[in-house]
Image (tube, rainbow, N blue to C red):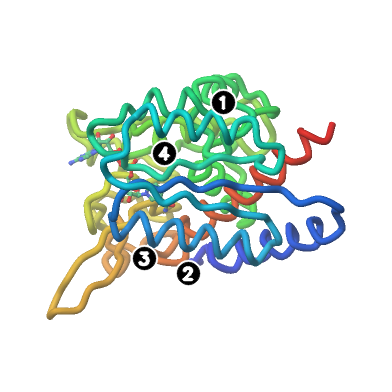
Amino acid sequence: MTELIDGKQIASEIRLSLKSKIEKLTSKPGLAFILIGNDPASHAYVKMKKKGCLETGIHSESFFLDQNITEQELLDLIQKLNKDPKIHGILVQQPLPNHISSKKVIETINAKKDVDGFHPINVGKALLGEEDGFFPCTPFGILRLLKAANIDLTGKHVVIIGRSNIVGKPLGAMLIQKKPFLNATVTYVHSKTKDLHMHCKMADVLVAAIGIAHFVKKSFLKPGAIVIDVGINRVTSEEKSRIVGDVDFDDVHDMCSYITPVPGGVGPMTIAMLLENTYKSFLMTCD
Ligand code: NAD
């Protein structure tokens, strides 16, 4: 029997718990959004994140900047927000225009306000298993989903398809930590891996973070595998547009023990972790 891991429900419980903690505060955590240009998907993501702030009582400020803004103007804004005591988290929505260096932007954000968890200091802390930084929101959300489903990863073989800096790489680093519920054995596979199927078929837990709609089919899985679908892909058929994952849900679902749906799996958890990181940043400032 396949169990669906309901990320929407788990994220909603996390938001409710945050809301009740934030209600009791005399001052509020604050999150600044910076969005450059007119990419509709980026605008949709920021809108959802702002809605999360509103629901939990996090103060948010948005900076919608022209596509042609210079790199220096953007860095100056980040520096200003680094010093703003009302702001505990700074999120610069990716992707950035080609003339702006993503590396410079990430490194300009004060690591203590880097609630996306992309700054090299936070990446290093995640790798070292230190808890006083910020874990990147999507891998952190996946950990919390597994925990909520009571899946102990100790000794389990997790195969991660995709090695991006925001999902695949940090996820592996987090799952391999010598900590309760973690202690996984991790294999990364990617676009240059030989015999990808063979590796995937050995997975107790298969994580798909590729960015190709319906890439993972039944033939990739060992019976009873746990499948985590990170993908968000827009596909259009018969003039209707919808979001699908990197996993072909209909093909695989009766072969897994657990599976996350798309939408309603990892996506809502990413936003919930952003809100948690902002709250954590606020608490660390108060210390
Ligand atoms: P990315 O493009 O940075 O990385 C994709 C990875 O997939 C690369 O490491 C590449 O080596 C690998 N890959 C590509 N083609 C492959 C192939 N044919 N075989 C094996 N590996 C292959 O993407 P990303 O930012 O990690 O995102 C991955 C997916 O997750 C996308 O669909 C993205 O929209 C989604 N995403 C979702 C969330 C969420 O909150 N649910 C957050 C971030 C990303």
Q: Which residue is mark 2?
A: 1
Q: CA distance from mark 3 to mark 1?
A: 35 Å
- Could you tell me if residue 21 is visible in this image? yes
Q: Residues within 10 Å of mark 4 (few under 14, many from 20)?
A: many
Q: Amino acid at mark 1?
A: Asn
Q: Which residue is mark 3?
A: 253
- Image position, residue 279 (x, y; %): 71, 46
Q: Residues within 10 Å of mark 1 (few under 14, many from 20)?
A: many
Q: CA distance from mark 2 to mark 1?
A: 39 Å
Circles 3 and 1, Cβ within 8 Å, touching? The answer is: no
Is label 1 or label 4 in front?
1
- Image position, residue 53 (x, y; %): 62, 59
Q: Which mark is residue 167?
A: 4
Residue 183 appears left or right of 228? right
Circles 2 and 3, Cβ within 8 Å, touching? The answer is: no
Q: Secondary structure at mark 3?
A: helix
Is label 2 or label 4 in front?
4
Q: Which residue sits at x=54%, y=60%?
A: 50
Residue 202 appears left or right of 77? left
**Ligand 1 quarter of the rendering:** top left
> Would the CB of label 1 be found within 8 Å of ligand 1?
no
> Would the CB of label 4 be found within 8 Å of ligand 1?
yes
